[in-house]
Amino acid sequence: MSVAVLSTFHVHPTDDLLDEYVFGRLQEPALSALEDHLFTCSSCQSTLAELDDYIRAMKTALAERKPANSASAAAPPAWARLLGGTTLLGGTTMVWAIPLLLVLAGGAMVSWRLASWRMQLAPESVAATLTAFRGGDRAAFAHAPAGKPLDLVIDGTSLPAAGAYRLQIVDASGHDAWSGAALASDGKLSAHVSKGLSPGVYWVRLYASQVFGEAGLLREFGLRLD
Amino acid sequence: MPADPLQEVAPVLAELEKNAPDHPALGSDATDNTEAYAEWVDLVERIRTGQIDGMAELYHLFSRGIRFYLCRQLGPQELDDKVHDTFVVVVQAIRKGELREPQRLMGFVRTIVRRQVAAHIDRVVHSRREQMDLDSSVRIADPRGNPEEAAIFRQRVDLIERVLAELAERDREILTRFYLHEQSQEEICSEMALTETQFRLLKSRAKARFGELGKKKLAHKALHAFFLRTSAGLSH
């Protein structure tokens, strides 16, 4: 949908456009045009509020969902049990187990080669552990190289519980540089910043993402990229 | 121009907020932008010259949108005060002549609201930098809201879990990438060899299914409540 169409009062944004707005991916001038529309269109305000609720619930449901194969991954594959067990079905089992082993080995080799190839194409991420600081103590800034993807890690032990967390990175001028979900696991929060950021000082803000904005702001961290 | 515009505007605001009806947004039914812009030029002039009906109209036009935007960005705490402050800033700026092109009233209000949000978050962040540990003087709203809201939210999550259980693993992965990891449509389609149509179809199917299950649940609740009332009536 073009900006010119959005600026016309009686044309409403699509669900896809609202998705982009909710995730903070909408850029100017479409962003201003959409917000102008939302200021005066109560119908779209309601649609956006419903979308916010839907996305929050979806995030929570997906985060709570266990990996699909976690139960079966814990148990040894059936073919291993058949080969190793004492209660074999006899010669019939051994006959088809061997070609099955060969197929699986071939598949594993292909998967490994594909994964290696993908890793070569993707720039290597750099890990950065964020520490909350007091009163502008620059020594507590995390350091990382500029221009590279980042894997941000936060110690979550003293944080209030929330359904989901979100990080926002702003530059020294307060402009939004990146935002995305932070995933909780083993008492830590982690987030992957796929785009490389320019050198400079950044502030990383952690929110409880069910209430984005002031009421959901939990911590702020310093990050310097050189 | 009065010495303190705030003193003149504040009582008007209080009255407007007390009596604010659910006013349909001006312009939402406008089919001609030229007419709307002409209305704004007239409106701005009335505000600039201090006419109360101008401020009332501005309030009816934008208060709901400003309230919605501020609530979304800053949360529901002290929302009335924030809307009030924003409205005062807008009126003051108009009366000082800072709006040079009245037909750009919408963008002008938007800019002021955004600045209010940014300034508010900066104030909160600066004050919290001095208080790393939570103590009794620092209150952060429970993100789960009140128990009723938490129960409603939990119901929504349960419905979505039912929707997810009906999907194939690959479809769940796509939704996980989009909603949980917040990958863009382009990234997902590129990494998972999907077309844009396939992606959008899955997204809308999941949302539609969620809506269906929600309606069924509501209908079931209404029927259940009806039978409860009916049986209660029969027992008398």
Image (spheres, rainbow, N blue to C red):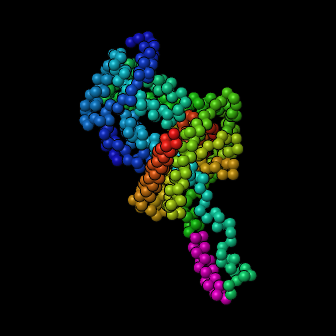
As drawn, A85 above or below B141: below
Residue at 31% across, 23% down: B43
Task: Name the residue rendered at 48%, 32% in the picture.
Answer: B70
Rendering coords of residue A160 (x, y %): 66, 40
Determine the image quadrant of residue B9. top left
Number of disc labels: 0
Left/right placement of residue B234 relative to residue B37 reads right
Question: The C terminus of chain A appears in which quarter of the rendering?
Answer: top right
Asked whether residue B8 appears in the rendered view, the answer is: yes
As drawn, the residue found furthest toward the right would be A86
Vertical order, B21 against A173 (above or below)? above
Residue A120, given in percent of the width and then of the height, sits at: 57, 63
Q: Nearer the viewer, residue B53 or B156?
A: B156
The image position of residue B128, as x and y in percent, is: 64, 31
Name the residue furthest top. B3
Q: Position of residue B5 (x, y in %)?
A: 43, 15
Q: Residue at x 46, y 48 (%)?
A: B223
Q: Which residues are magenta?
A: A91-112
Q: Is residue B118 visible?
A: no
Nearest the viewer among B30 and B41 is: B30
Name, please, the residue furthest toward the bottom.
Answer: A91
Q: Residue at x 57, y 57 (%)?
A: A123
Is A97 contained in the magenta span?
Answer: yes
Magenta stretch: dominant SS?
A: helix
Instruction: Give residue B195's quadrant in the image.
Output: bottom left
Is residue B171 highlighted in magenta?
no
